[in-house]
Image (cartoon, helix red, strand yellow):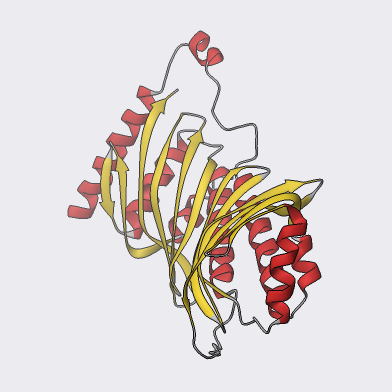
Amino acid sequence: MKSIKTVITVAVLMTNLISCGQQSDTEKNQIKQSFVAHTPTSHHEVALEVLNASKNWIMNFNSGNAAACIKGYDTKAIMRAMPFGIKKGVSEISGFWKPFISSGATNLIYTNVSIEVVNKTTAFLSANWSMNLGKGIIYQEKWERINGKWLLTYDDFEVLEKFETPIKNDTNPVANHIILEEVIQASIKWTNSFNSGDNKACGNGYAKNAFMNAVPFTSIQGKEVIEDFWTKLINDGTKNLTYHNPTFKVKTDKSATLSSQWSMNIGEGKIYQEKWEQINGKWLLTYDEFQVLKQY
């Protein structure tokens, strides 16, 4: 009985959402959906491209290919390498990396990776890093697409500890990158399912006991009730869900979060957190909190 009441409550609330967004034909013609200058998952795809460029840079470093690492920077790039100083332009950056790699630096590993997509040509990556000689933090890698290629235009990192003797770490250097790639692909699949009207697939994107907080309308728990929520929206004609300026962050080896601005044909808002967890080999939403900030 409690489940039936919850479903009824959700249906009433979602009817209110749709009706609140209804306006005259004249008003509708004056309002345009935000963020439609790009496709619904365009920024997801940018994140995937930058993650791939970052993986290639790391693998080149670990294989001792200094020349390829240098080619990963724009000619006018700036690198802030603390405590060593600021390097301006590819010549100074080359003068840092070439002797450093030649000295035996290797085994570079990124952890706690986070990537924010600004637009179709810009993204920011941050992470913790370690290698055989020490460890530290990457405050910001600014990646920009220039002439069709993703390049570093700003690189800000710091050495927090130098090891007295080299230490080997058998961790996959790009394991965090792979986690984010899988979560981004799962998010793309969910978004495409919603936009194609596949309510069942939307429901299947949640864990059995997932919790969803849809501000200001409802807080619900359970895969079936959450599916009913999305089914109501889809049946009422809601579509064209678009993510804008998303940030993807690794939390553990089996969890990651996503935050983003969003828009649909009926309104727009903010996703404060999608928590994705790997359960029985599948990435599922276990927590989903978003808010409607504007109704069309």
The x and y percentages for residue 168 are 56, 90
Closest to the observer, 13 or 68: 68
Q: Quadrant of residue 93?
A: bottom right
Horizontal side, residue 278 vs residue 228: left or right: right
Instruction: Depth check: give the residue in front, 200 or 240.
Output: 240
Residue name at image x 26 percent, y 47 percent: 219
On screen, residue 8 versus residue 151, left or right, reads left
Can you say whether 279 is above or below 209 in the image?
A: below
Whether 6 is drawn above or below 201: the answer is above
Residue 241 seen anywhere in this rendered image of the structure: yes
- The quadrant where residue 157 appears: bottom right
Residue under the image location 72 percent in, 75 percent down = 99
Is 173 rendered above or below residue 201? below
Which residue is at the front of the view, 3 or 66?
A: 66
Q: How many marks?
A: 0
Q: Looking at the figure, which quarter contains the N terminus?
A: bottom left
Q: Residue 14, located in which quarter of the rendered image?
A: top left
Q: Residue furthest left?
A: 1
- In the displayed structure, does residue 105 sit left or right of residue 179? right
Residue pictured at 35% horizontal, 65% vertical = 208
| Coordinates of residue 229 in the picture (x, y in percent) | 36, 45
